[in-house]
Amino acid sequence: MTLVVVTVMPKKGVLDPQGQAVQGALQHMGFSEVADVRVGKRIELEINGHDPAGQATKMCEDLLANNLIEDYSVEVPG
């Protein structure tokens, strides 16, 4: 079994209301040095088979990421 980590983030230029809310809260708490916040998701998959990264990429294209508004990366740590 192989651990595969998928990171999904909003594309540059796509409105990120959750990121804006976090940035506003941080600034309100005194962290004025924070210039931008983007909020995404991390997905950890344990995959059997000969090409776990390829399988995870296919999963991203089919389900895990909305390719119109999100970018993704696939990593096999280790």
Image (cartoon, helix red, strand yellow):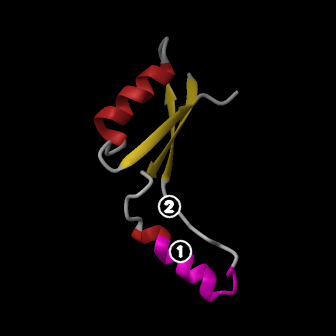
Above/below status of 15 relative to 41: below
In percent of the image, x 60 and y 28: which residue is there? 76
Q: Is residue 4 left or right of residue 64?
A: right
Badge 2: residue crowd in 10 Å (few <14, some 14–19, many ≥20): some
Tag 1 residue: 22
Percent position of residue 2, x then y: 57, 24
Percent position of residue 11, x then y: 42, 51
In percent of the image, x 50 and y 61: which residue is there? 39
Say which quadrant the N terminus sits in.
top right
Percent position of residue 4, x then y: 55, 31
Q: Write down the region rendered in magenta.
A: 20-32
Magenta span dominant secondary structure: helix
N-term mark: 1 or 2: 1
Q: Which amino acid, by three-letter code, is at mark 1?
A: Val
Per the image, label 1 sits on a secondary structure element best described as helix
Q: What numbered label is drawn on residue 39?
A: 2
Q: Which amino acid, by three-letter code, is at mark 2?
A: Val
